[in-house]
Image (tube, rainbow, N blue to C red):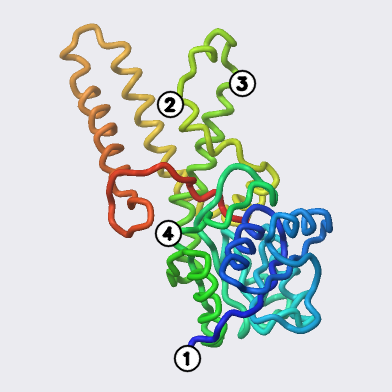
């Protein structure tokens, strides 16, 4: 089947992700319309060169619903009813519950395919957007059995126009994957950063780049992340439960080391500690190098912040 060309698009939601998508599309010559419940946000995105603020007079080829997970189904239903586009996708970081809600609310699922561009940063809003935000990053598509082929191809074309690598997964596979590589890391970063509220100012004055690195994700939007984590709660809880088991084991290990009277009494605990540190080195080495599918030395880039 010949791939349908993307000549026009609409982006619903002009935050970081939506505006970045629009900027990328405009850079590739796609006529792009910007829609937001906050007209000022759409105007700001338009002033940045992301497209035309307002709705098109005729249906566009593809509409991207770039709103938080809990609002996707309602926005999809509204804009399908208004015939905004021939095909629809979204950019939310949770897929299974969104798809279920879209089905419950009567959305046309033949013309919708779930999507999730795997890139972002801690800042939010259109002013933080960048046309190259998704360059070299995976862009997950989660078609349902009833999704028509043209819709999937248009969403695939969208990802490629934004410089991303389309990856097809089931909704459940996606949600389990992002629970491991994005959602739980954000929550763990927040839990660690929250411990700093109990620190003395003298202690905090000693903080270096290492602490900033591991707490960077904690700077994300609280409202957005409450939505993301709440929508993918079961998958995140499963990963967090395994992590908490490892933490409990390390607490016992360190207490044993701290109370050992002779070096030989703590040898087993030292071995367990060294094993955890080694597994950490090995696990980090499995993170693919930026823009590839192969593991390798990490480069500096934004970890997935959940998109929208």
Q: Residue at x 40, y 31 (%)?
A: 248
Q: As displayed, is residue 11 above or below residue 262? A: below
From mark 1 to mark 2, how far is it between C-alphas?
50 Å
Q: Nearer the viewer, mark 3 or mark 1?
A: 1
Secondary-structure class at tag 1: loop
Tell which circle, 2 or 3, labels the residue nearer the N-terminal end: 3
Residue for badge 3: 197
Q: Residues within 10 Å of mark 1 (few under 14, many from 20)?
A: few
Contact flag, marks 2 and 3 (Cβ < 8 Å): no
- The quadrant holding residue 146 is bottom right
Secondary-structure class at tag 4: loop
Q: As displayed, is residue 141 above or below residue 196? A: below
Q: Which mark is residue 210?
A: 2
Looking at the picture, tell me which residue is in the foreground, 280 or 81. Answer: 81
Contact flag, marks 1 and 4 (Cβ < 8 Å): no
Q: Residue at x 30, y 37 (%)?
A: 280
Q: Nearer the viewer, mark 3 or mark 4?
A: 4
- The quadrant holding residue 273 is top left
Q: Which mark is residue 136?
A: 4
From mark 1 to mark 4, how far is it between C-alphas?
25 Å
Secondary-structure class at tag 2: helix
Q: Which mark is residue 2?
A: 1
Q: As displayed, is residue 280 above or below residue 27? A: above
Tell which circle, 4 or 2, labels the residue nearer the N-terminal end: 4
Q: Residue at x 56, y 69 (%)?
A: 28
Q: Position of residue 57 (x, y in %)?
A: 81, 81
Q: As displayed, is residue 59 above or below residue 177? A: below
Tell which circle, 1 or 2, labels the residue nearer the N-terminal end: 1
From mark 2 to mark 3, how far is it between C-alphas?
18 Å
Q: Residues within 10 Å of mark 3 (few under 14, many from 20)?
A: few
Q: Residue at x 83, y 54 (%)?
A: 40
């Amino acid at each position: 089947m010949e791939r349908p060309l993307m000549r026009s698009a609409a982006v619903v939601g002009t935050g970081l992700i939506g505006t970045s998508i629009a900027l990328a599309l405009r850079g590739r010559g796609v006529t792009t319309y910007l829609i937001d419940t906050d007209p000022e946000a759409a105007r700001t995105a338009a002033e940045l060169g992301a497209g035309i603020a307002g709705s098109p007079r005729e249906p566009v080829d593809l509409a991207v619903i770039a709103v938080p997970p809990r609002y996707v189904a309602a926005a999809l239903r509204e804009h399908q009813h208004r015939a905004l586009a021939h095909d629809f996708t979204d950019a939310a970081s949770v897929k299974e519950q969104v798809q279920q809600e879209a089905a419950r609310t009567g959305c046309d699922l033949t013309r919708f395919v779930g999507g999730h561009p795997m890139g972002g940063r801690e800042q939010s809003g259109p002013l933080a957007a960048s046309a190259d935000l998704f360059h070299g990053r995976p862009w997950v598509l989660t078609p349902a059995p009833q999704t028509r082929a043209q819709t999937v191809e248009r969403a695939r074309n969208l990802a490629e126009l934004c410089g991303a690598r389309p990856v097809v997964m089931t909704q459940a596979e996606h949600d389990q994957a992002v629970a491991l590589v994005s959602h739980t890391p954000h929550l763990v970063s927040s839990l660690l950063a929250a411990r700093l509220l109990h620190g003395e100012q003298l202690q905090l004055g000693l903080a270096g780049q290492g602490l900033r690195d591991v707490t960077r994700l904690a700077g994300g939007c609280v409202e957005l992340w409450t939505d993301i984590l709440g929508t993918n709660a079961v998958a995140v809880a499963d990963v967090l439960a395994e992590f908490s088991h490892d933490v409990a084991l390390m607490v016992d290990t360190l207490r044993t080391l701290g109370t050992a009277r002779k070096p030989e009494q703590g040898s087993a605990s030292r071995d367990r500690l060294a094993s955890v540190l080694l597994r950490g080195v090995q696990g980090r080495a499995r993170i693919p190098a930026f823009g590839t599918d192969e593991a390798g030395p990490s480069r500096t880039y934004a970890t997935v912040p959940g998109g929208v």
